[in-house]
Amino acid sequence: MNRPKFYVYLPIVFALLLILGIFIGSTFHLNRKEGSIDAEAVGGSSKIDEILKFVAEQYVDTIKPNKLMDKTIVSLLQNLDPHSAYISADELAETNAPLQGNFEGIGIEFNIVNDTVCVVAAIPGGPSEKVGVKAGDKIVLVDGKKVAGIKIKNKDVMTKLKGKGGTKVKVSMLRRGKSQLLNFTITRGIIPIYSIDASYMVNPKTGYIKIARFAESTFKEYTEAFKKLQSKGMQQLIIDLRGNGGGYLNTAVSLADEFLSDGKEIVYTLGRARPRKDYKATSAGDFENGKLIVLIDDGSASASEILSGALQDNDRATIVGRRSFGKGLVQEQSEFSDGSAIRLTIARYYTPTGRCIQKSYAKGLDAYYEEEYKRYSSGELEHADSMKVTDTIKYRTPGGKIVHGGGGITPDVFVPLDTAGNSHYLGEVLYSGILNDFSFDYADKNRAKLSAYASPAQYSSSFEVSDELLNEFIEYATKNKIKRNEQQIKTSKAILKNEIKALIARTIWNNDGYYPILQEQDNVLKKAIELLK
């Protein structure tokens, strides 16, 4: 089911200022001598218009007025706060796609392995699956032009394969066991972007749902995942919001309503030009009493903080992990006739106890985003007592628990960043993509043998990454210019084996195979399971 987006119109005064001042400001005639600006005659929004015309006429190089205008608006909004933004017409569709839950293309997940575009999966119900594209196929030609062996990049693949629904693209693929290229004519269409990365039972009583974003389709996906787990005997639930940067406010409210009883405050918004607006739970909700844990980290922001804050303030869930990002500003999007749009901060949101969790941005954009790195360098991610919040006011939940605002949601149970097994070598193979490439190649070559496992669970319990297979990977990495370091390999051996095993499973079973294996070395999830016991 679709939930309404949190879109309304901009304040009339701002719209008039921006539209009249920048777009039709030529109505106001200014006294200007050639090569100068009359500072006394210029004021307010008319000054912006006058400067734009002056630069267009007098600048040493030829410029494009529309691009100059776009950059001007970008700068104007950036100086307000970190989250007010201008989005050009070219960028708008791409920006909105993850939240609207779809984009237009041929519907494949791919990796570039050995300079070849390899199909990881054909998205169910998508155009590629319908014409017979399969996991493991290697794309050689797109519209007759070679894409293999030319050092192609991810963005170039996306450019060639994405496109307006209804248009066609000819793709030639090499399939293992076939001597000739397979030629497909694929009609592009709407491709779903899923919000639920994984949902499975971590033990006979406990369900786990990982939510990647709060989009239009998220609530529907969550409901389907919840019912599936419930049918398997789920009595308690873990919601994973780690790395979830947020999305639509109303989606977060709908999810919170699933866990809170009728009339409970979820969140309220308040701005200088906007009166207080309260969002409260209704009588709907399928899990208002079972044990609930929410996992967060410094990548959990915005709508993730609304949900975790609402559940924490109502004493409904135990929040586990590390302090969240700290985004408590609400944006509205307004689109212009040329297809561009602005997202303007019009309010702050407050959790049920009245705390605003927006972290300070008084020192500018650079300092705002560097704050995440400072958490790491200060030791906050490893030690709870290094945690800093700017709001010293103590807020009390109905159950008497003390919570703070001014810098994210502080977890009820802190779990430090796990640094055991880390090494420079591990970082290199993870961030270079070499580990992913090797695992995909192994899985593709052994697809028939691996597919013989009845389920991801059977694979997980039966398949082991041997020392021989690990050595194969190390040789592969060395050939790809990752310097061998025996001591660091020994330090990271268990993680390397677990990652290879999980990535092989992802190639065969997608995320249903991947996340349960990663769980084996996930200390935050392990802590949540321990707490539920």
Image (tube, helix red, strand yellow):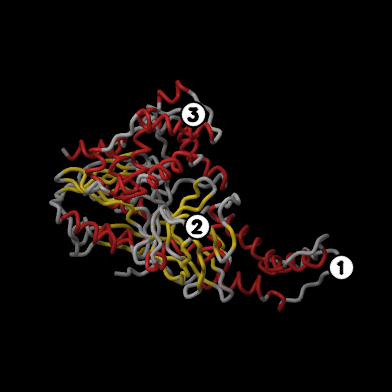
Q: What is the quadrant of the N terminus in the image?
A: bottom left
Q: Who is closer to the viewer here, 130 or 396?
A: 130
Instruction: Report whether residue 353 is seen.
Output: no
| Label 1 crowd (10 A; few <14 / some 14-19 / many >=20) | few
Q: Earlier in the sequence, mark 3 or mark 2?
A: 2
Q: The residue under label 1 is which amino acid type?
A: Glu
Label 3 secondary element: helix
Q: Is residue 505 above or below residue 429?
A: below
Q: The residue under label 3 is which amino acid type?
A: His
Q: Is residue 430 above or below residue 140?
A: above
Q: The residue under label 2 is which amino acid type?
A: Ile
Residue identified by numbered label 1: 34
Instruction: Report whether residue 2 is seen.
Output: yes
> Which dot, 3 or 1, sits closer to the camera?
3
Residue identified by numbered label 2: 139
- Give the residue displayed 35% in from the left and 67% down from the top: 125
**Residue reaching furthest front?**
179
- Give the residue displayed 59% in from the left and 49% down from the top: 151
Q: Position of residue 488 (x, y in %)?
A: 45, 24
Q: What is the quadrant of the C terminus in the image?
A: top left
**Could you tell me how far apart the alpha carbons at marks 3 and 1 are, in whole angstroms?**
60 Å
- Give the residue displayed 72% in from the left and 68% down from the top: 65
Q: Which mark is residue 424?
A: 3
